[in-house]
Image (spheres, grey):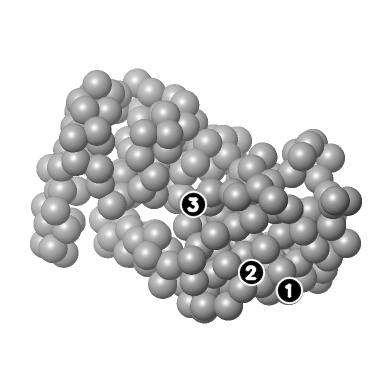
């Protein structure tokens, strides 16, 4: 698998470094931080969610998981832990290459975020500087978290469907990947909400989608 991946990606002019065990992965990431990490946890006997969590702490580059496991629980757990995309094996190499291009576009903020500053209640998104503030707190987001929050802020206090968020933040080919939005919303709430179990900013509209509440100003 690694040899085929390396060959496919090299033909597309990517520079590829490979590691076959967890210690080598951590050493490679530390020595030469990559633009994107392809994680195959099953080969190394790793738990995908734990591996994503550790890699996200070591290096902010996006993570694409390639796994034998295809349940919604596995998908959501990996996304909650910081994965940007998740593919179940067997993997079609052309599809993987397309997914990598999409993830790298998002990482480079080629998602047409624009250059404005958006306010919605207590949440401010400075799009051009990729800065998020909630009240007086500065929040650091991954590219996909930024894309989702920006779309919610642009439609302040309006419910956006899951399909809308998937289409705008991931792309039209993802409109059936409902678990992706659930995972990113969970991560945003952990970072933004005072109490993620009782959200006041990002609210759920059951069976429809999510909205960023305009009436979320905190008292001074």
Q: Residue at x 52, y 36 (%)?
A: 81
Would residue 133 be visible to someone looking at this image?
yes
Label 1 residue SS: loop
Q: Position of residue 133 (x, y in %)?
A: 64, 55
Give how far apart the Cα atoms at labels 2 and 3 are: 14 Å
Q: Position of residue 194 (x, y in %)?
A: 77, 39
Graded by Cα atoms within 10 Å as few (under 14), some (14 to 19) or many (20 or more), the crowding at tag 3 reads many
Which label number is shown at residue 142?
Answer: 3
Q: Residue furthest front?
A: 220
Q: Position of residue 161 (x, y in %)?
A: 73, 66
Graded by Cα atoms within 10 Å as few (under 14), some (14 to 19) or many (20 or more), the crowding at tag 1 reads some
Q: Are the two marked residues, 2 and 3, in contact with CB atoms closer than 8 angstroms? A: no
Left or right: 95 in relation to 3: right
Q: Are the two marked residues, 2 and 1, in contact with CB atoms closer than 8 angstroms? A: yes
Q: Nearer the viewer, residue 2 or 50?
A: 50
Left or right: 215 in relation to 187: right
Q: Residue at x 21, y 28 (%)?
A: 27
Which label number is shown at residue 155?
Answer: 1
Would residue 171 be visible to someone looking at this image?
no
Q: Which residue is mark 2?
A: 151
Label 2 residue SS: helix
Q: Residue at x 73, y 53 (%)?
A: 135
Give how far apart the Cα atoms at labels 3 and 1 are: 20 Å
């Amino acid at each position: 698998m690694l040899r085929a991946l390396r060959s496919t990606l090299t033909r597309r002019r990517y520079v590829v470094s490979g590691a076959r065990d967890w210690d080598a992965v951590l050493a490679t990431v530390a020595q030469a931080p990559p633009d994107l990490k392809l994680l195959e946890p099953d080969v190394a006997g790793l738990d995908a969610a734990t591996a994503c969590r550790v890699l996200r702490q070591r290096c902010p580059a996006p993570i694409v998981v390639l796994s034998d496991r295809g349940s919604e629980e596995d998908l959501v757990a990996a996304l909650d832990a910081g994965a940007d995309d998740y593919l179940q094996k067997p993997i079609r190499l052309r599809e993987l290459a397309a997914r990598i291009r999409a993830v790298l576009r998002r990482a480079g903020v080629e998602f047409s975020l624009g250059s404005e500053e958006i306010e919605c209640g207590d949440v401010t998104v400075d799009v051009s500087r990729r800065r998020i503030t909630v009240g007086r707190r500065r929040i650091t987001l991954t590219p996909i978290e930024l894309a989702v929050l920006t779309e919610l802020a642009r439609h302040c206090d309006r419910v956006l469907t899951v399909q809308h968020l998937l289409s705008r933040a991931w792309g039209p080919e993802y409109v059936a990947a409902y678990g992706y939005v659930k995972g990113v919303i969970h991560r945003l709430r952990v970072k933004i909400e005072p109490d993620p179990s009782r959200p006041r900013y990002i609210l759920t509209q059951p069976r429809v989608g999510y909205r960023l509440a305009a009436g979320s100003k905190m008292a001074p």
